[in-house]
Image (tube, rainbow, N blue to C red):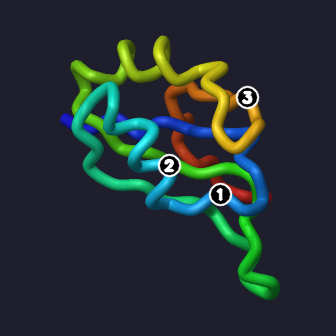
């Protein structure tokens, strides 16, 4: 099974490759996605990393609070997207 992790407090200049490298030190990464503004293409300051189920607790523990580009990352299990009103 795959777990999706929410990664918050990313710098505006964060790139998916840099995020992947930081997380790969702790577990194999299945995918990385930084959410960007449709109009400006600029990062919205958060993204998602997919890891194997059994790697998720370790990755959250190691990466929550990790300094990336001078920012302290907020990492936790992503919650399912809720329907918008």
The local secondary structure at tag 1 comes to loop
Q: Is residue 40 above or below residue 6?
A: below
The local secondary structure at tag 3 comes to strand
Among the 4 quarters of the image, the one containing residue 58: top left
Identity of the residue drawn at 50% across and 53% down: 18
Where in the figure is residue 54, as x and y percent of width and height? 22, 19
Whether residues under marks 2 and 1 lie with C-beta atoms below 8 angstroms apart, the answer is yes
Of all residues, the one furthest to the front in this rendering is: 70
Instruction: Answer few, some or many: residues within 10 Å of disc 2's Cα (few below 14, many 20 plus, some between 14 and 19).
Output: some
Identity of the residue drawn at 45% across and 39% down: 22
Of all residues, the one furthest to the left in this rendering is: 1
Among the 4 quarters of the image, the one containing residue 85: bottom right
Real-space CA distance between mark 1 and mark 3, rounded to the nearest whole angstrom: 13 Å
* Residue designated by label 3: 72
Q: Nearer the viewer, residue 69 or 10?
A: 69
Identity of the residue drawn at 72% across and 65% down: 43
Q: Is residue 2 above or below residue 57?
A: below
Badge 2 or badge 1: first in the primary sequence = 1
Left/right of residue 37 with respect to residue 3 in the rendered view: right
Left/right of residue 34 with respect to residue 50 in the rendered view: right
Where in the figure is residue 62, as x and y percent of width and height? 47, 16
Badge 2 or badge 3: first in the primary sequence = 2
Where in the figure is residue 19, as x and y percent of width and height? 50, 48
How many discs mark residues in the rendered view? 3
Q: Is residue 27 above or below residue 20?
A: above
Which mark is on residue 6? none
Q: Is residue 42 above or below residue 18?
A: below
Which mark is on residue 14? 1
Real-space CA distance between mark 2 and mark 3, rounded to the nearest whole angstrom: 13 Å
* Residue designated by label 2: 19
Identity of the residue drawn at 72% across and 81% down: 41
């Amino acid at each position: 099974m795959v777990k999706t992790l929410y990664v918050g407090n990313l710098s505006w200049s964060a790139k998916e490759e840099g995020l992947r490298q930081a997380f790969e030190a702790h577990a194999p990464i299945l995918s990385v996605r930084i959410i960007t503004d449709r109009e400006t293409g600029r990062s919205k300051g958060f993204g998602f990393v997919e890891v194997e189920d059994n790697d998720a607790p370790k990755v959250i523990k190691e990466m929550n609070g990790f300094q990336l580009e001078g920012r302290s990352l907020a990492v936790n299990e992503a919650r399912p997207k809720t329907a918008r009103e």
